[in-house]
Amino acid sequence: MNPDLVLVLDAAAFAADKHRRQRRKDAEATPYINHPLTLATILAREGSVADAEVIAAALLHDTVEDTETTLAELEARFGRGVAGMVAEVTDDKSLPKAERKRLQVARAAHKSPGAKLVKLADKIANLRDIAGSPPADWDQARKAAYVRWASEVVAGLRGTNAALEAAFDAAAAAII
Ligand code: ZN
């Protein structure tokens, strides 16, 4: 048994179950699980990230924010390291959206290296979605505003993984 493989596959199966009724906001309403799977693939393939806990955290990164999953549940099943990274990338949904966005910018530089990798992959995936299969009601001004905000978040994440930072820059340049 390879414990890294078991961790990653268990995280993928857990996330698929938790997100099973959710869809992305693109015109095709892509199954939500494609998004965390995309993050994990970006990290492994483009970022050469080999830490299974970071890959697992990427697969689980939206479970607490967007499903009924608790951090205690993640800690019991996947350990403190994974749960801690997910906690670091989880917005407090009791706050207004503008405040959540401001906090993402303010807190980016203070995150752990693993959480920074997950955040970078999340922003890359979101920009690629906006370029390739945007929400139907997003005009160019809204796309550009998202890119500007994501760039402010990523400014706090730089110095973590050069390949991923370059991938983000390329994805941003494709939109504005
Ligand atoms: Zn995400």
Image: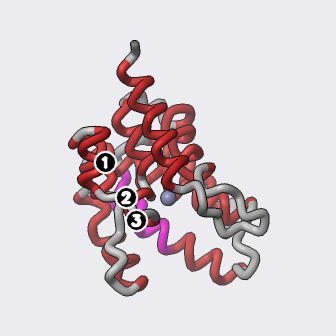
| Residue to which mark 2 is pinned | 69
Q: Tell which of 50 and 143 is nearer to you.
A: 50
**Residue 154 magenta-highlighted:** yes
Image-based side of 132 in relation to 4, left or right: right
Toward which corner of the image does residue 128 lie, by quadrant?
A: bottom right
Image-based side of 91 in relation to 174, left or right: left
| Residue to which mark 3 is pinned | 65
Image-based side of 27 in relation to 15, left or right: right
The residue tagged with tag 2: helix, strand or loop? loop
Residue shown at 71%/67% (left/top)?
Answer: 26
Q: Residues within 10 Å of mark 1 (few under 14, many from 20)?
A: many
What segment carries the magenta color?
149-158
**Residue 49 magenta-highlighted:** no
Can residue 133 be seen at all in this image of the molecule? Answer: yes
Q: Examine the rendered structure and indicate whether residue 141 appears above or below residue 127.
A: below
Q: Examine the rendered structure and indicate whether residue 55 appears above or below residue 165.
A: above
C-alpha separation, residue under disc 3 versus residue under disc 1: 12 Å
At which x and y percent is residue 148? 52, 73
Q: Examine the rendered structure and indicate whether residue 3 appears above or below residue 74.
A: above
Q: Which one is in front in this view, the residue at disc 3 or the one at disc 1?
A: 1
Quadrant the N terminus occupies: top left
Disc 2 and disc 1 in contact, CB within 8 angstroms: yes
At which x and y percent is residue 12? 50, 40
Q: Tell which of 148 and 63 is nearer to you.
A: 63
For marks 2 and 1, the one nearer the N-term is 2
